Image (cartoon, coloured by chain):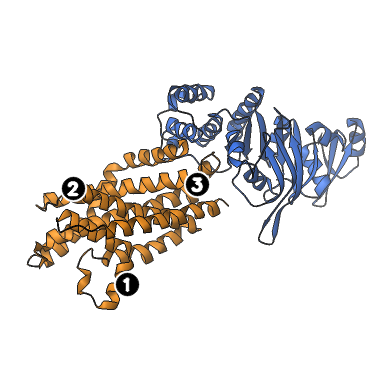
Amino acid sequence: MNAIDVQGLTKMFGSTQALAGVHFSVAEGELFAYLGPNGSGKTTTIRILTGLMRTFGGTATVAGYDVTKHSRKAKTQCGVVPQAVNLDRDLTVSENLMIHGRLFGLSGRSLRDRILSLLEYVELLKKKDQFVKHLSSGQQRRVMIVRALVHRPRILFLDEPTVGLDPAVRRQIWMLIKSIQRQKTTVLLTTHYIEEADLLADRVALLCEGTIVDIATPDALKSRLGNWALDIYENDHMETHYFKDRQDALNTASTPQASVNIRQVNLEDAFLQMTGKKVS
Amino acid sequence: MNGFWAIYLRELLILRRRLGMLAGSMSVAPVLYLVAFGFALGQDIEIAGHSYLQYLLPGLIALSSMTQAFAISGEINIARFYWKIFDEFQAAPVSRTAYVAAEVLAGMTRGMMAALVILLVGSLCGIRLSLGPMFWLAVAGNSFVFSSLAVFLAMVVREHAAQMMLNTFVITPMAFLGGTFFPSDRLPAWARYGIEVLPITHASRAIRDAGLLRGFSWTPYLAMTCIGCAFFILALSQVHRATE
């Protein structure tokens, strides 16, 4: 059984089509990245799958439960980390986690122990009695991630988990996400950061204007273009050519009077080739 | 039930953090009303055998418990529009009934606290009321009505500014009418009929009758129960719509 199954998902906001027939499935334990520019429908998909949006077309199941018909059962299987920080600023770190645990039916010593072990896991045990408003952005993000894990969800939804964080903190969050996946948790991650999807994901869905244009492993998506990209800058204009071998790229780069850059193909190239648009 | 206790506990924790500030703010307006209307204007006035101060205090309790119970709408909207904590509740397996009941109880808790603060202020001014079970039932009924109305309206509005407007149109007129400061039977008939529809009128009457031992009628209690339940049901339906 797949952890997530989505068939023909559609969603309209007035006359704007946010999702135009999205299909995908995520296997148990997989880290699946949903890559697309702002406004492509990433958050809408997550809100539907986590029960925050009820009116949509198509079907979606999470851990085998239809998100419309068995919404509450589906929710028990999910942990959600939204894009905006939605911690209770007037509560301490451990109170935030405690309230979350109680929302999911946990209480007593087992909840207290779970909170302590999670805070230790993200190296925030010393901050447990601090108010959330006094934490740094990176610490708040880590609290949000462990809060979503308190009730031991089978599936973790991360909506742009590193947006607005500095590169060093972003890398810390990436390591945390990877270690969560190693514990057999299925992860659906939305991002518009190429590097994030490339580094973390087992498979990537390229999303553009509410439609998935391709789904594959990061390597497969990139290798469809070749391994090497040659950017040629001429008269304020850039043109990119793709090559299987680096030597072919070097040979082409020897054109006089042009500024060139040889680099490895990335997911931005794949996205650009598929859609004619940039991700970020 | 887990969701209910979690949400109520959250509100209590926040309430505890702000207790001093909140108790202070709860007493400001009533003290001003007591000084201005009670001591300055109403010193020599007597209504139905009671001094105006004695008459005024139950009205202030109705007014303050109404305002504080209704204030839960502001808390809900801040949590919903600014902090996005409503999403956290919505993503949890919590029923609509549990959510509404917890927020209504949180509003009622604030309403009851406000009544305690006014009683304390009153006793410092030498005004004593009879605090029997019917008095507390009346305060609880009033808090239930306005807390349920608050949750309902908090789910209706789409932005915090709209909430502020509702306060002006809904709460301010009720604060001054509805038998809080003066007996409604002195008003013209057309105004009296209008005021009888307001829930605060029933609350003022029940709190005053119980507090001043002026006799007893189930009618205001029944009215508050019916109106409160109607708002509670409306709140349930609106939570469903507010999900998106």
Evaluate if marks 3 and 2 touch, with contact meaning CB atoms under 8 Å apart. Answer: no
- The amino acid beneath tag 3 is Arg
B89 relative to B121, above or below: above
Q: Say whether residue A78 is visible.
A: yes
Image point (41%, 31%), residue name: A130
Q: Position of residue A18 (x, y in %)?
A: 69, 53
- Name the image quarter holding residue A242: top right
Q: Nearer the viewer, mark 3 or mark 2?
A: 2
Lateral position of residue B103 relative to residue A117, left or right: left
Distance from the alpha carbon under mark 1 to that under mark 3? 33 Å
Distance from the alpha carbon under mark 3 to that under mark 2? 34 Å
Name the colour assigned to chain A in the rendering.
blue
A193 relative to B71, above or below: above
User: Of B158 and B217, which appears nearest the observer?
Assistant: B217
Residue at the left extreme?
Answer: B44
Residue highlighted by disc 1: B194
Q: What element carries label 1?
A: helix
Bin the neighbour count of mark 3 within 10 Å (Cα to Cα): few under 14, some 14-19, many 20 and up. some
Residue highlighted by disc 2: B132
Residue highlighted by disc 3: B96
Counting residues from the start of the chain, the first of labels 1 and 3 encountered is: 3
Image point (70%, 49%), residue name: A40
- The amino acid beneath tag 1 is Gly
Task: From the rendered image, report the letter of the chain displayed in orange.
Answer: B
For mark 1, name the chain. Answer: B
